[in-house]
Amino acid sequence: MGSYRLALCVLVVCAAGGASASEAPFLKSLAGSWTGAGMMKRTTASSPIDLSCSFQSKANGEALSMNGKCTGLLVVSRDVSAQLTATGGNYAGRYIGPSGRVSALKGARRGDAIELAVTWSRVVNGDRAATMTIRRSGANELRIRTVDKDPASGRQVVTSEINLRRN
């Protein structure tokens, strides 16, 4: 369901950062208020839904938590939360989507992007796997993109993308 991808987008913002021996300085740079817009798809075959999102993030050493709300179609608003921990260049975490279900993230940084394997809490688009890339563009911008496999064609489809700016 699209709300799960929306929740995942929120968590992925938490993951954006570098893969140095200590991620704490970078994670601290992500603390604060963020807003942005983008799109999500309920399924790989559905039409995109425009989103407007706002988040508040807090850093504590090698951990980052983020709480936020995304609104789509002017009537659907969802609270989401996420936690992520960095160990060296590896990231692991979870997010709790609107249904209260927990999904997992695991990955590492490559250049200016974090590449994550997603394990959904239930079957989404025919399986429980997807990928997410978080790319930092400058000091105050993040782009979060989730890609899932279309069960009918087998092709990779962008199912969500949110562009954020620091307030």
Image (spheres, rainbow, N blue to C red):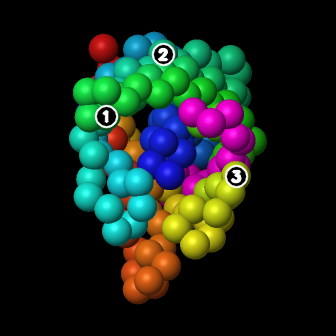
- The residue that label 1 is drawn on is 72
Mark 2 vs mark 1: which is more N-terminal?
Answer: 2
> Is 54 left or right of 57, judged from the image as shown?
left
How far separated are the C-alphas under marks 2 and 1? 19 Å
Q: Residues within 10 Å of mark 2 (few under 14, many from 20)?
A: some
Kind of residue at badge 1: Gly
- The residue that label 2 is drawn on is 56
Kind of residue at badge 2: Gln
Magenta residues, dominant SS class: strand
**Circle 1: element type:** strand
The quarter holding residue 80 reads top right
Q: Magenta span has 105?
A: yes
Pick whichever, 111 or 16, lies toward us: 16
Q: Residue at x 57, y 33 (%)?
A: 98
> In front of the other: label 2 or label 1?
1
Q: Is residue 146 visible?
A: yes
Mark 2 vs mark 3: which is more N-terminal?
Answer: 2
How far separated are the C-alphas under marks 2 and 3? 24 Å
Q: Residue at x 35, y 49 (%)?
A: 40
Rendered view: 100 above or below 134: above
Q: Residues within 10 Å of mark 1 (few under 14, many from 20)?
A: some
Q: Residue at x 41, y 54 (%)?
A: 42
Mark 3 vs mark 1: which is more N-terminal?
Answer: 1
Residue placed furthest toward the bottom: 153
The range drawn in magenta is 98-116
Measuring from the top left, give residue 21's x and y in whole percent.
Answer: 68, 41
- The residue that label 3 is drawn on is 121
Q: Magenta span has 7?
A: no
The quarter holding residue 156 reads bottom left
**Circle 3: element type:** strand
Residue placed furthest toward the front: 75
